[in-house]
Image (spheres, rainbow, N blue to C red):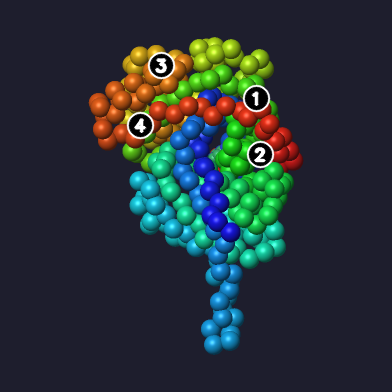
Amino acid sequence: MSAIAEAAPAKLNLYLHVVGRRDDGYHELDSLVAFAEVADRVTVQPGVARIALRGVDLPPVGPRLAISGPFGPALMGESPAQNLVIRAAYALAARLGREADAMIALEKVLPIASGIGGGSADAAATLRALARLWGVPVTDQRLYEVAASLGADVPVCVAGRSCYFGGVGEVLEEAPALPETFAVLVNPGVPVPTPAVFKARRGAFSAPARFTGAPADAAALAALLRERRNDLTDPALTVAPVIAAVLAALDDTDGCLLARLSGSGATCFGLYADAEHAAAAARSIQAAQPRWWTKAARLLPTPADAPPLPTGL
Ligand code: C5P
């Protein structure tokens, strides 16, 4: 069988309200999630389940992972047991009652610990790719259950399409279709640990702020989003003050409809009505700040034939 590849697109929180805190310390969120057309890539192939040495079966070989790409070296220090791709492979194999025999290649294009899904998107792409390799529909509820056990952001990344995100990520609901919109993603190269940002959050909780009608165009979407926030912006600024400069740089570009932090940061995004303005904005930020990671990318439209979102996670 030939290799199976799955994209792990960057996740953007178009708005993110922190609406409460559970007894276990996790924060309940209300967020409109979208995905951008810039992605890590996960490729899987059949692996070796077991090898025998002089007629004696050795313990299972387990998944093998090869990492490449510009942000690959940032993951190299991580122990295999921590790596979400390896954990996803073991967890799915256990749930399906089979060996985790697979060769996995991860091309790491997106910055790590940066508020755009990263490890969660990679884990989700691994689940989708292994499901295909192992003959399971990618809509199988077991994929989502495994995803939820791996991390709060993994189920929405398995769905891989724009939707409302509630609870701590276990409640995924249909959102109005997004109009054609282009984004510029900018990361200043400062990893921001999510727990530190939630810990720095102060003050009252926000109300959920879902809207129902589909915005006619990118400007109408931005107008709706401007009435909402990312509640993690202030706490993220205390952890990584450079975020203020990133937001200002995006805001300054021609045609920027909205500049906002994604997730707990430090990646910020600007929204634009057309590809030309997004490309020009990315070029100007890149020229002014060559050390920042800057990418122009279309927001992925919701496919007309998208499978239903999972329930009961
Ligand atoms: O899900 P993830 O492993 O990214 O979460 C890391 C940490 O961020 C959690 O242990 C928790 O401290 C905090 N967090 C939170 N509420 C969320 C998500 C994360 O408080 N919804």
In the rendered view, would you say 34 is above or below 83?
above
In the picture provided, is 164 more to the left or to the right than 246?
right
In the picture provided, is 252 more to the left or to the right than 39?
left
For the residue carrying disc 2, how many other residues have a C-alpha within 10 Å: few (<14), some (14-19), or many (20+)? Answer: many
Q: Nearer the viewer, mark 2 or mark 1?
A: 1
Q: CA distance from mark 2 to mark 1?
A: 15 Å
Q: Which residue is mark 3?
A: 256
Query: Is residue 174 in view from this perspective?
Result: yes
Q: Which residue is mark 2?
A: 170
Q: Which residue is mark 1?
A: 175
In the rendered view, would you say 199 is above or below 296?
below
In the picture provided, is 102 more to the left or to the right than 238?
right
Q: Dot 2: what SS?
A: loop
Q: CA distance from mark 3 to mark 1?
A: 23 Å
Q: Earlier in the sequence, mark 3 or mark 4?
A: 3
Three-letter code for the amino acid on which mark 3 is drawn: Cys
Q: Which residue is mark 4?
A: 294
For the residue carrying disc 1, how many other residues have a C-alpha within 10 Å: few (<14), some (14-19), or many (20+)? Answer: many
Q: CA distance from mark 2 to mark 3?
A: 32 Å
Q: Are marks 2 and 4 in contact (CB under 8 Å)?
A: no
> At 58% across and 50% down in the image, what residue appears?
129
Q: Are marks 3 and 1 in contact (CB under 8 Å)?
A: no
Corner quadrant of residue 22: top right
Horizontal and vertical percent position of residue 239: 38, 35
Horizontal and vertical percent position of residue 257: 44, 15
Q: Nearer the viewer, mark 2 or mark 4?
A: 4
Q: Dot 4: what SS?
A: strand
Corner quadrant of residue 234: top left
Query: Is residue 263 in view from this perspective?
Result: no
